[in-house]
Image (cartoon, grey):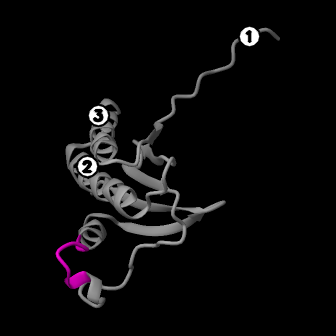
Amino acid sequence: MNQPLPQLVGTRHVFTQLLSPTRRGARLARLLGVTQLQSWGAPQDLTERAEFVVAELASNAVLHGFVSGRSFRLSLAFDASSGRLRIDVTDARGDRWPLTGPPGTAPEMLRTGGRGLALVAALCDHWETLPHPPSGKTVRAELTTPNRE
């Protein structure tokens, strides 16, 4: 009756951090993401792709999702057994969603910036934008490691 419960060895890791909506906060998101993935033993190819994705999504949260006095959130969920990583960056601007059309189709893509999400799409298996009530949004990216035979 008073026996200890068996401990399950979980391979799912989760990390969440609120960050200031500044360039320094975006840089810190990238550094924390890489450090966390390395501490979990994530493969280097996955960590390198995730580093770029986190940097771009955090930068976008600072540039386009800024609301005075509101932080943005970085969340990582890594399932080591399947090699699957989910990156969520949540900001307070639910009224400004990223463009999701093919690269080069929108006039905004012709400006100096605006190519980061095209690179994110190339590095990820899937990405999307989801509402985050009451007034924010979450940009979610999913990456997997290639199967190694």
Local packing at callout 1 (Cα closer than 10 Å; few below 14, some 14-19, many 20+) is: few
**Rendered residue at 82%/11% (across/down):** 1
Main SS category, magenta section: loop
Q: Please determine whether, in this image, residue 6 is positioned above or below residue 68.
A: above
Q: Nearer the viewer, mark 1 or mark 2?
A: 2
Asked which quadrant contains residue 53, the reply is: bottom left
Q: Which mark is residue 3?
A: 1
Q: Do labels 3 and 2 touch, CB within 8 Å?
A: no
Q: Magenta includes 46? A: no
Q: Position of residue 23 (x, y in %)?
A: 29, 48
Q: Do labels 1 and 2 touch, CB within 8 Å?
A: no
Q: Earlier in the sequence, mark 3 or mark 2?
A: 3
Q: Residue 5, can we see it? A: yes
Q: Position of residue 146 (x, y in %)?
A: 27, 57
Q: Position of residue 111 (x, y in %)?
A: 20, 80
User: What distance separates the C-alpha of mark 3 from that of mark 2?
Assistant: 10 Å
Q: Residue 149, can we see it? A: no
Q: Which mark is residue 35?
A: 3
**Rendered residue at 39%/64% (across/down):** 64
Q: Position of residue 18 (x, y in %)?
A: 47, 40
The span picked out in magenta is 109-115
Judge from the rendering whether residue 42 lies leftward or rightward of residue 19; answer left or right: left
**Nearer the observer, 79 or 48:** 48
For the residue marked with disc 2, what is the amino acid? Glu
User: What distance separates the C-alpha of mark 3 from that of mark 1?
Assistant: 37 Å
For the residue marked with disc 1, what is the amino acid? Gln
Quick one: SS at disc 1?
loop
Local packing at callout 2 (Cα closer than 10 Å; few below 14, some 14-19, many 20+) is: some
**Rendered residue at 40%/61% (across/down):** 141
Residue with the mark numbered 2: 51
For the residue marked with disc 3, what is the amino acid? Thr
